[in-house]
Every structure is written in C-alpha cells, then in structure tokens.
Image (cartoon, rainbow, N blue to C red):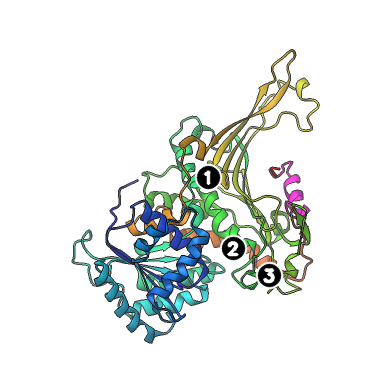
C-alpha cells in the first residue's frame, strides 16, 4: 500500500463522554502514543453536553483506562493525558459551534496542530445529520471548498469518521451520504467498520493475493460454499433499548454491516493496485453482483431468531424478552442467517451463508471455505463408516478471538491398512509472529490520521450492502406478526437455520 505521512492534527470527538470513547478510542490512542505512532503535534478535544473541565475529563478517562488498558503505565498516561482537552457543548445546536470553534483554535495553538482536524462522530445515529449540518455551517471544513488553488499536498485537511449504524435501510443510508456530501468530499469521509481493522481480515488479502497455491482454486470450480459466522456469548448487555430501535436487530447491526464487508473481501477480484480506490472498487462490484432476495424466497434464504432462557457454564441466563429495557413482546431478532449468491463469473452458483447471533455457544468470528468433494470416490470402501464419505477440505480463517488460519485435509493414519482421517494444519497469528494483533480501532484511527481510506467503506459499498438485505428486512417488517423462532441461550441458534443448510446437504461449522 502507498505510504501516507502522519501530519500534525487535532482529533475532535463529538459525544466524548460516551462508552465508545473510554472503551475503545482513548485506549487505542494511548497504544499509538506508546508505540510513538501519533504525530508529534497532536491533540484530542472531547465535545459533549456533560459539564466538565479538562482535568475532570482526564480523571474520568483515567478511571476507565485502569479498567480497559492492559498494563497501563500511569507515568506514561500522565504524559499522554496532556494532549487531551474538553469542551462542554451540544453539537446539534447551531449556537454551540461558536464556542466549539474557539476551543478548537485554542487547542490548536497550544499543541501546534495547525488547521488539520479529524472529526469523530461518537454519538447516537439520530444526531449525525444535525451535527454534520452544523459543522458545515460553522465553516470548519475548508478542504475541497475554498482551497482549490492551493497545492493539494500542503493545504490543510478536515476529515470525518462516522460510526455505525450508517442508516437503518437503503433510503436512510443514501440520505445520510447526501448530507455528508454537501459538507465533505468523498475522499474526506471515513465510514468506519472495526471488522475491517482486524488483522486477520487484512491478512485475508495477503493470503489470497500473495500465494499462488490458493488463488487458482478460489472459485466456483472448486469451492462448494462459504460461511461467515460472528457469534457472541453475551446478550444485549443493557443495550436492549438500542437493539429494539429501528437500527437494531442482528440483520442490521451485524449482517448488513460487518459480515457483508467480510464476504466482500473473500469474494472480490484482485485489485489493480493495493490501494484504497482499487480495493474499494472491487468490493463495490461484489455488492452490485449480489443477487436480490425475492419476497417469495425469504423464508427459504433468511432465518431470524431470538434467544430465550438457557444456561452457559452452568449459569442460568434470561431470555431476550426478560432483559432490562426490552419490550416483553419484542419481535427483534438477536440471530440472523442469510443465504446469498454473488452473480459473477468466479462465484456463479456458490452460496454464501452469513450468520450472527447473541447468547450463542461460543464467541468467535470465522470464515469457512468448504471445497467440493473429489470428482471420483476412489476411497469409497475406506469411508463407508462415515455418513457422507470423505470430509470435504476446508480453510477456516479465524478472525477472533484466536486469530489464525486452519487448513483441513484428509490423510492416512499410520499403520496397517488404509485408514483415512482428517488432518488439521494451523497457522496461529500470535505464535507465528510473536506479536499481539493491535486493537482494530488503533489501526483505523491511525489510517484516518494518515489519510488512508483502504479499510473504510465507500458510499457505494454502504448503499450496496443495504440493497443486499433490504428485501429481507421489508419481508420481516410486513410479517411481523408471525411467530419468531427462539433458541436457548448457550446454543448455536434456532433449528430453522440448520434446516436451511440441510436443505442443500450442508451444515454449519459449530466448533466445540
């Protein structure tokens, strides 16, 4: 990928008193500081409605840092904290921006960051539009507007990072893109998806395009189907109100955003160059090629479910409808599974199965590439005891928590006779490179500071992903009175999901 310089800048976090800032953003920035990867002249300005001074904000963050930063060095923290400032203000109120601009100028002068700024919207999605409009009206953004005659490399920049959810359907996502486009150039908009910041997802590009032994078989001739799973053992964790909102539910919260992005990396064609424009163009093509699911096919190709009471590690767990803040008659799905087809020359006829759920048997995110059986059953006699003959070859890419790649193939058991057994070869990311993968947010924040959009979503990707699932969302909304399948907490989801797979002679990979 091309080199991007780290230039002085100010990071302004709108909604800075929220959970994301203390859990992810500040710990990631601290890691970048410890690794000496931040610009020499750098500052963080937190903006939120809560009244606080700079020191009170720093103390608030330190309390969280002791919980969320492993091996926190408090002497280093005090040095890092001198970069952090705070301004109380409500970003949805136009009159608040006079104070915000003045505070930004003060911080810029103190830290010598110049006019470069990275604006981060870490707030409720319903506040995105008024905040973006106010940013534009306040004159904070100059790049692409009044600096056209200045050399591109030397002019100051302003960029914006948008958290998910990016809309709650195709229409609202397109509208938000138009709102952003009136204030920012597309090259300055960073739609974040922390899954794309995970090392193993990035490693998938290397796995595919740097190894001649895999790319020739990465197609419909050899691959039977692809599975992408994101399973969580936790429930809604006090977020029942959000999960029951128009932006909530497993289909919108996980499948539409994270899993479709991972699928696109698996399915994309090799880009012309390993740079943002090339990679994002190829992913956009996958979304354009994704076959829309017709209403008549939704019951066969899309499954939803909701976790009920169950147990894990011997501990009883409540069902979703018993969680605090959840409507006791809620029809919100905590599990969603989808069967998609990508109508391209490479993938014609190959199903992609995507699923995500809460309160499942094991926490994992993985990609499973299952290959077709050999064209001739040469070892039929040796495999009569197996239900389906030889186990098909698989490549399992573990995205989290145990990052790595597993290759499964058949081998002969040593000894007399021809006994065949599956063999597994493991590549463990941590053991192989003797290094812990960085936090995804650290990677993405640094890329945004550098101006590298490779791991961020283009507007075409966002709208294309919504189109891929819109038919399912509409069908479920129109049939909201139908009984919602349930599954016991601590299991692998509703039986209807297994039936969807079994209908085509396939099954989910459910590791113990």
Q: Does residue 424 appear left or right of residue 500 in this picture? A: left
Q: In this view, does 205 lie above or below 464?
A: above
Q: Which mark is residue 253?
A: 2
* Residue 97 locus on image (x, y percent): 35, 82
* Residue 91 locus on image (x, y percent): 42, 79
Distance CA(mark 2)–CA(mark 3)? 16 Å
Identity of the residue furthest to the bottom in this view: 95
Numbered range of the magenta stretch: 492-507
Of circles 2 and 3, the one toward us is 2
> Which element carries disc 3, helix, strand or loop?
helix
> Which element carries disc 1, helix, strand or loop?
helix
Of the residues under marks 1 and 2, which one precedes in the sequence?
Answer: 2
Q: Residue 477 carries which label?
A: 3
Between 51 and 412, the one lying in front of the other is: 51
User: What residue is drawn where x is 78% and y is 62%?
Assistant: 309
* Residue 4 locus on image (x, y percent): 30, 52
Q: Residue 266 carries which label?
A: 1
């Amino acid at each position: 990928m091309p080199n991007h310089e780290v230039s002085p800048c100010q990071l302004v976090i709108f909604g800075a008193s929220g959970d994301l800032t203390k859990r992810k953003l500040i710990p990631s920035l601290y890691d970048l500081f410890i690794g000496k990867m931040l610009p020499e002249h750098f500052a963080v300005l937190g903006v939120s409605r809560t009244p606080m001074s700079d020191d009170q904000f720093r103390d608030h963050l330190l309390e969280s840092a002791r919980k969320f930063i492993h091996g926190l060095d408090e002497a280093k923290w005090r040095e890092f904290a001198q970069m952090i400032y705070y301004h109380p203000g409500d970003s949805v109120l136009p009159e608040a921006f006079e104070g915000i601009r003045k505070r930004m100028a003060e911080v810029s002068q103190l830290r010598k960051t110049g006019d470069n700024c990275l604006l981060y919207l870490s707030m409720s999605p319903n506040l995105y539009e008024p905040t973006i409009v106010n940013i534009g009206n306040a004159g904070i953004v100059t790049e692409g507007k009044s600096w056209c005659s200045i050399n591109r490399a030397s002019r100051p920049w302003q960029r914006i990072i948008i958290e998910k959810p990016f809309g709650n359907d195709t229409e609202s996502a397109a509208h938000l893109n138009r709102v952003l486009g009136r204030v920012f150039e597309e090259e300055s908009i960073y739609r974040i998806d922390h899954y794309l910041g995970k090392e193993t997802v990035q490693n998938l590009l290397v796995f595919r395009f740097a190894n001649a032994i895999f790319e020739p078989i990465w197609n419909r001739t050899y691959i039977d189907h692809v599975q992408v799973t994101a399973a969580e053992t936790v429930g809604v964790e006090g977020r029942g109100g959000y999960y029951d909102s128009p932006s909530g539910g497993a289909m919108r919260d996980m499948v539409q955003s994270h899993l479709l992005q991972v699928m696109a990396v698996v399915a994309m064609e090799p880009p012309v160059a390993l740079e943002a424009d090339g990679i994002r163009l190829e992913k956009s093509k996958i979304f354009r090629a994704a076959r829309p699911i017709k209403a008549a096919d939704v019951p066969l190709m899309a499954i939803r479910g909701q976790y009920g009471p169950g147990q894990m590690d011997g501990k009883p767990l409540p069902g979703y409808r018993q969680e605090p803040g959840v409507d006791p008659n809620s029809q919100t799905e905590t599990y969603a599974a989808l069967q998609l087809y990508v109508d391209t020359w490479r993938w014609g006829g190959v199903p992609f199965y995507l699923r995500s759920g809460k309160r499942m048997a094991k926490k994992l995110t993985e990609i499973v590439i299952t290959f077709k059986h050999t064209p001739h059953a040469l070892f039929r006699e040796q495999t009569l005891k197996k239900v389906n003959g030889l186990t098909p070859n698989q490549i399992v890419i573990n995205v989290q928590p145990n990052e790595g790649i597993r290759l499964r193939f058949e081998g002969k058991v040593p000894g007399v006779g021809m006994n065949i057994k599956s063999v597994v070869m493991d590549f463990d990311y941590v053991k192989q490179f003797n290094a812990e993968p960085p936090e995804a947010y650290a990677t993405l924040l640094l890329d945004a500071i550098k101006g590298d959009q490779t791991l961020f979503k283009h507007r075409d990707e966002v709208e294309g992903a919504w189109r891929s699932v819109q038919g399912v969302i509409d069908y479920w909304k129109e049939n909201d009175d139908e009984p919602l399948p349930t599954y016991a907490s601590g299991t692998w989801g509703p039986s209807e999901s297994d039936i969807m797979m079994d209908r085509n002679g396939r099954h989910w990979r459910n590791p113990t």
